């Protein structure tokens, strides 16, 4: 790939002499910078318009990147994509190491304390009302034999008994009390899974970057505006909002949903799409709810993740996931059954419409609210009695095939992208940067091949990217809402 430093001399010069600019301090930018520094690269700088070192990646302080969030799922359930399964297990080991480091560190970043757990092994319950799907069957086949004892089919009496002997509360298997109400339910409880406190994890990773010598340029004046090039077409640096030119021989654009607008060549492969996030805050005087949703009793869960369909009556309830409460009492739901787009940004230069994150509003499309509400009315009615504290869009970057895009941009010497998380990238924060380093150093691995630059399929489905501005998922075609609607009446029982 043209632009990649392939010759040994060039790589060594980049490593020891030349500056590297990482644009974006979300997961992809953090992991890239951290592992470049750990690999011996001496001049690495992160640029971001958010003052993450001060605001701790807090959603409540206006942070709008996908990485800034209450929590994210940590799981190794990847079906046939064993490559990601293996990488997830590697990440879990480092997440555990980070938990121990946070517990014992004398110096900590803002918004992180010694009592924080970055990742919590609460278990991950994957549910449906009609058996296991093919993806789950393949996941179970691919799990390493030595840890298959951590996988429990919730309809298998022997495995339920085994779980009880192993000290797993019965509420982890049936948190919605469906059995007692004779509601159909099936699924797998994955004892290896759990969740990450996302904003705290990013704060910790940013702290590690600084400890390893990465320079931080954070705040509005450091907002990336343009790349600068020499007469020969090689990157020479980046210009930020204050007009300053920062020299760089390699620029890594890791801007999540903003990447297609910044790197035009990438918009045939990736697209900014939004999941819908709702949070409910438990009242401090409701000890029953605090106990119920405690991660000791309540798992991370998903419900019919592949089943949501856009039908006329919008009665399909699927594509949902949720979490135990956070330490401050927030219960979060996510809906990815419909991945919303926002084709309102006209890109400078070519005038092309690009899906662009629309942040700052505390609303979600009505279909998302309805799906969550229908599910809760049947399974968590106590939460529908509480107000939605916050509804928001979480802007991810989907690729045509859900593989990450980490590679040099064709015919743009010294320009690279690290993006395409497709809703499953966060868990790899501790380890993904090693693959970024491999790509920079020209190594040929399973990961570098999977993450390489590629073309959109000539025909057929491209993970929704083929729809463009005419698709049904665009925000201009949606009604938005911020609260539960009057009690929904439907014959559907999720």
Image (tube, rainbow, N blue to C red):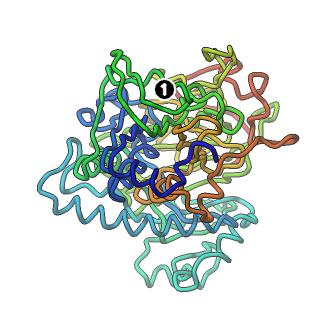
Residue 386 image offset from top left, x and y in percent:
43, 35
Quick one: 258 or 339, which is closer to the camera?
258
Q: Can residue 456 be seen in this view?
A: yes
Residue at 36% in and 33% down: 47
Image check: 304 left or right of 171? Answer: right
Residue at 34% in and 30% down: 60
Farthest-out residue, left: 106
Residue 114 image offset from top left, x and y in percent:
18, 56
The relative height of residue 479 versus residue 330 in the rendered view (above or below) is: above
Quick one: 265 or 14, which is closer to the camera?
14
Q: Is residue 428 visible?
A: no
Residue at 49% in and 32% down: 235
Secondary structure category for the residue under label 1? strand
Label 1: few (<14), some or many (≥20) within 10 Å? many
Residue 430 image offset from top left, x and y in percent:
40, 58
Farthest-out residue, right: 459
The relative height of residue 121 versus residue 268 in the rendered view (above or below) is: below
Tell me the residue that label 1 is attached to: 227
Quick one: 68 or 353, which is closer to the camera?
353
Residue 263 sits in quarter: top right
Quick one: 403 or 129, which is closer to the camera?
403
The relative height of residue 59 versus residue 442 in the rendered view (above or below) is: above
């Amino acid at each position: 790939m043209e632009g990649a430093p392939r010759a040994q001399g060039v790589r060594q010069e980049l490593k020891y002499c030349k500056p590297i600019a990482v644009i974006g301090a979300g997961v992809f930018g953090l992991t890239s910078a951290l592992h470049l520094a750990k690999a011996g690269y001496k001049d690495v700088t992160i640029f971001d318009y958010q003052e993450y070192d001060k605001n701790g990646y807090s959603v409540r302080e206006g942070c709008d990147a996908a990485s800034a969030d209450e929590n994210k799922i940590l799981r190794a359930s990847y079906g046939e994509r064993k490559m990601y399964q293996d990488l997830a297990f590697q990440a879990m080991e480092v997440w555990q190491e980070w938990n121990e480091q946070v517990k014992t560190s004398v110096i900590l970043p803002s918004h992180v304390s010694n009592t924080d757990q970055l990742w919590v092994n609460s278990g991950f319950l994957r549910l449906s009302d009609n058996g296991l799907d093919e993806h789950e069957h393949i996941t179970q086949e691919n799990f390493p034999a030595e840890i298959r004892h951590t996988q429990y089919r919730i309809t298998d009496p022997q495995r339920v008994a085994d779980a009880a002997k192993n000290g797993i509360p019965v509420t982890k298997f049936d948190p919605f009390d469906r059995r007692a109400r004779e509601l159909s339910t099936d699924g797998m409880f994955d004892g290896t899974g759990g969740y990450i406190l996302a904003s705290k994890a990013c704060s910790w990773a940013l702290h590690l970057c600084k400890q390893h010598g990465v320079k931080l340029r954070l705040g509005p004046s450091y907002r990336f505006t343009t790349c600068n090039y020499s007469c020969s077409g090689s990157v020479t640096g980046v210009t930020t909002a204050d007009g300053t030119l920062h020299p760089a021989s390699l620029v890594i654009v890791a801007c999540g949903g903003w990447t297609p607008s910044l790197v035009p060549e990438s918009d045939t492969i990736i697209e900014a799409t939004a999941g819908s996030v709702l949070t409910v805050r438990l009242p401090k005087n409701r000890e029953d709810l605090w106990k119920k949703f405690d991660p000791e009793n309540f798992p991370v869960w998903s419900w019919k993740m592949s089943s949501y369909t856009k039908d006329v009556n919008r009665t399909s309830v699927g594509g949902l996931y949720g979490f135990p409460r956070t330490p401050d009492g927030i219960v979060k739901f996510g809906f990815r059954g419909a991945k919303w787009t926002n084709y309102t940004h006209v890109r400078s230069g070519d005038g092309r419409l690009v899906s662009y994150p629309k942040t700052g509003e505390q609303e979600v499309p009505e279909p998302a609210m309805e799906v969550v509400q229908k599910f809760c009315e049947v399974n968590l009615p106590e939460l529908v009695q509480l107000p939605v504290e916050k509804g928001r869009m979480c802007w991810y970057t989907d690729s045509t095939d859900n593989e990450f895009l980490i590679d040099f941009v064709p015919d743009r010497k010294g320009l690279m992208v690290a993006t395409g998380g497709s809703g499953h990238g966060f868990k790899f924060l501790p380890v993904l940067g090693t693959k970024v380093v491999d790509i920079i150093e020209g190594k040929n691995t399973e990961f570098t091949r999977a993450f390489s630059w590629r073309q959109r399929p000539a025909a057929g489905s491209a993970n929704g990217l083929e729809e463009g501005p005419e698709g049904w998922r665009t925000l201009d075609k949606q009604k938005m809402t911020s609260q539960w609607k009057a009690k929904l009446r439907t014959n559907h029982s999720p």
